[in-house]
């Protein structure tokens, strides 16, 4: 049975500070799950646990019921891809080449040898290139394929980063604050793109979205998990969570705290 990614009673402490406390959640196959919460709630820490950047002190992770010990460099082999905060694109490569690097682990001969001018299978490279172009097309940015990322607006670079993550054909995509730095229109378009990811004919994938931006999360997620001070204070559909007094309190509480530190 397909169970997807599960976190079981995860606890993380930094010195005396409890960043995550008994956090359990599941990202089922082909669903979009959002993690929200006020500043310092533990969202990025949770993201880092799943990526393998932070080892939990207590609890465990499973992928389809099997124990998962994430390591950042092994993620794509497990079928998990992530976008980096900022966009993390290679300035010296074109948009298309950036996207192709996302799939390098799937190519038999390898795209990296090709970049270095070493012999590689033409067929592999043509296949990678076509897949990368298809992804750019699907995200509405095929016209920028040959451009240098530095010449493009931030919203386009973000889509390039998304295409690069998708090039690995993940079954789970992790997104950390993808709406950061985007305007309202760009956020609405991003929401539409994310919503389509589990519904694509080719390579549909689940999404775990860690995001401060309530509107985006409410618009795209099938399920939400709300963190506050490292604990899950609410979980459910966007409608259920929106009306939960604990959630309103947590967000209002954070505002008051910012005013009086
Ligand atoms: N490497 C670290 N060392 C010490 N404390 C940390 C570290 N990383 C995070 N923290 C603390 O852990 C808590 C949770 O932080 P985290 O960054 O996960 O929150 P967040 O929900 O992502 O917040 P934001 O919305 O501001 O991004 C905070 O109190 C933070 O100060
Ligand atoms: Mg954060």
Image (cartoon, rainbow, N blue to C red):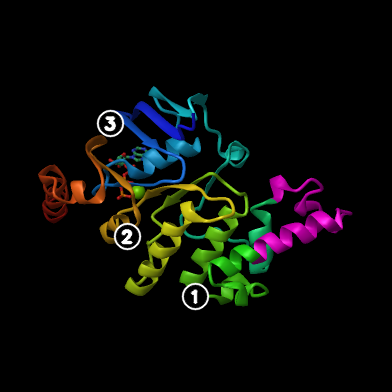
Q: What whole-number distance in Å separates the C-alpha atoms at marks 1 and 2?
A: 20 Å
Q: Residue 179, located in which quarter of the rendered image?
A: bottom left
Q: Which residues are magenta?
A: 104-133
Q: Is residue 215 left or right of residue 144?
A: left
Q: Earlier in the sequence, mark 1 or mark 2?
A: 1
Residue 216 is tagged as: 2
Please name the residue shown 68% across and 58% down the image.
Answer: 100
Judged from the image, the secondary structure of the residue bearing numbered disc 2 is helix
Please name the residue shown 51% across and 60% down the image.
Answer: 87
Residue 153 is tagged as: 1
The residue carrying pointer 3 sits among few (fewer than 14), some (14 to 19) or many (20 or more) residues within 10 Å by Cα, namely some
**In the image, the residue with mark 3 has its CB under 8 Å from the nearest atom of ligand 1:** no
The residue carrying pointer 2 sits among few (fewer than 14), some (14 to 19) or many (20 or more) residues within 10 Å by Cα, namely many
Q: Is residue 48 left or right of residue 90?
A: left
Q: Is residue 52 visible?
A: yes
| Marks 2, 3: nearer the viewer | 2
**Residue 186: x and y, percent?**
39, 71
């Amino acid at each position: 049975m397909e169970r997807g990614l599960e976190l079981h009673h995860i606890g993380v402490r930094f010195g005396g500070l409890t960043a995550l406390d008994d956090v359990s959640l599941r990202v089922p196959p082909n669903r979009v799950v959002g993690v929200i919460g006020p500043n310092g709630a533990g969202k990025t820490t949770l993201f880092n646990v799943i990526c393998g950047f932070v080892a939990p002190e207590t609890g465990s992770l499973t992928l389809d019921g099997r124990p998962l010990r994430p390591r950042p460099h092994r993620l794509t082999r497990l079928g998990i891809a992530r976008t980096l905060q900022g966009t993390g694109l290679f300035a010296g490569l074109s948009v298309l080449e950036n996207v192709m690097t996302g799939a390098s682990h799937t190519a038999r001969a390898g795209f990296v040898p090709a970049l270095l001018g070493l012999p590689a299978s033409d067929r592999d490279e043509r296949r990678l290139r076509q897949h990368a172009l298809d992804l750019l097309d699907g995200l509405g940015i095929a016209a920028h394929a040959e451009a240098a990322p530095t010449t493009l607006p931030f919203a386009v670079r973000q889509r390039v980063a998304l295409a690069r993550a998708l090039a690995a054909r993940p079954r789970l995509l992790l997104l950390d604050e993808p709406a950061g730095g985007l305007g309202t229109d760009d956020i609405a378009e991003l929401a539409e793109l994310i919503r389509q990811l589990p519904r694509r004919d080719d390579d549909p994938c689940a999404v775990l979205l860690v995001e401060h931006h309530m509107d985006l999360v409410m618009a795209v997620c099938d399920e939400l998990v709300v963190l506050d001070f490292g604990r899950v204070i609410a979980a459910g559909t966007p409608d259920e969570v929106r009306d939960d007094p604990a959630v309103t309190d947590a967000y209002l509480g954070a505002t008051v705290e910012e005013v009086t530190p």
